[in-house]
Image (cartoon, rainbow, N blue to C red):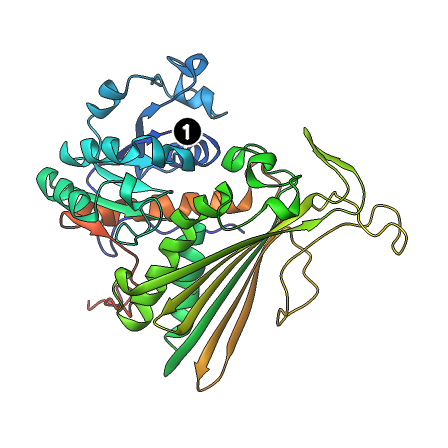
Amino acid sequence: MTLPRPATAEPGSAPTRPYRIAVWGPGEVGGAVIRAAVADPAFEVVGALVHNPKKDGKDIGELVRTDPIGIAATRDREAFKELDVDCVVLTPAPAAVIKGLDDDVIDLLESGKNVVATAAYHNVSMPNWLSPFRKSPQRMLEACRTGGATLHGTGVHPTFIVERVAMTMAKAMSSVSHVRSVEAVDFSRAGSMWGGLEALGFGADPDSLSAESPVARGGDIYYGDLTGNVAHALYGADSAEVRVETSLRGLPAERDAQVGATTIRKGTAAALHLTHRGYLGDDHFFTNEECWYLASVPTRPARSAPGAELVYRGDDLPFGGFTSPIAYTLVISGEPAEMRTQLEFGIGSGHTNPITTASVRAVLDAVPAVVEAEPGILVDDVGPHYRHDDRVRLP
């Protein structure tokens, strides 16, 4: 039996009409957002901004492999910005951040459009190497107040895994000294995510990978932001107080293999280990690890059966026996005892990556809160929050 999802409105109330949304960049995540929103009566999709000339003017529904909705996608940014919407769902490629994305977001906010983003706005106050090339946090807040709009960044990771799950776990502790988050994902079918396997560093000479590599720097707009959010949630620390150290290493393949269009040569990187460590002074309070591997790359042929895989899910993990290609391990250290958990995303029957699906729910569930919020920059708050029990009523 499949139970219906609760209404997206606040408990005890319902919107008088669907939330009108438009999607900026309907790729894998944006397309999945559109499909979910079309199927949800709480939302109405009224526009989409595309970048590929071949998609310009196409029906939005057909572009994302669902029924036509009678509305055409556009490449015209100014026309998109003129749409009458409650919220713009921003699902850009990470590279867009260094190509003037802040200017577009400011235009949207100043025109009164709320924005929910899946990249770059999880923590606008967190300084990093990109800060000199971006608009200041104060400028983003000014745009919100000018237009009476709200900006919010969300997704699976950052947001759901750490800011919600791990920080909720931390609420059970009397004190927290360190949080460790490990994401382990098989990227064999990642396709064009973050520019493709080669752009990520797969197939590269392991000695060429470092904290200065593009994927490590790109990771700062996710995992650096995340580090600042943990410091604030646990200790009330300002982002400027947080120091982040980044490292990237490649684990070599032991023989040649082909993964899609990418050739992995013997000795080149068949798995990546990207780590962000957060410090307050000399106190190491947070570690985020991204373990990305290619399960179809064989290794150690002399000591394993044919077709053995290089599957790297992290070192010194508290659990074993992972079977899913998408898994998370969380370890919360402190008093009265260490807490550990593991989450795995199984692969369903649909064509959407489970992480993408979970990101979609994080995005759509945020829309009502963002629309109803006072103008400003919204971040996740794990609570505690309470509400009256509307199941109990007086006659």
Label 1 crowd (10 A; few <14 / some 14-19 / many >=20)? many
Nearer-the-camera pick, 177 or 361: 177
Where is residue 305 drawn, in percent x and y? 89, 52
Q: Is residue 23 above or below residue 78?
A: below
- Which residue in the rendered view is the most extreme toward the front? 207
Where is residue 343 drawn, in percent x and y? 56, 61
Where is residue 221 drawn, in percent x and y? 38, 47
Q: Is residue 345 above or below residue 16?
A: below
What is the number of callouts on the image? 1
Residue type marked 1: Pro
**SS for tag 1?**
loop
Q: Residue at x 75, y 38 (%)?
A: 265
Nearer-the-camera pick, 166 or 205: 205
Q: Label 1, on which residue?
A: 26
Report if residue 228 is visible in the image: yes
- Which residue in the rendered view is the most extreme toward the left? 146
Q: Residue at x 51, y 50 (%)?
A: 2
In this picture, residue 167 sits left or right of residue 104: right
In this picture, residue 271 sits left or right of residue 379: right
Report if residue 293 is visible in the image: no
Q: Quadrant of the C terminus?
A: bottom left
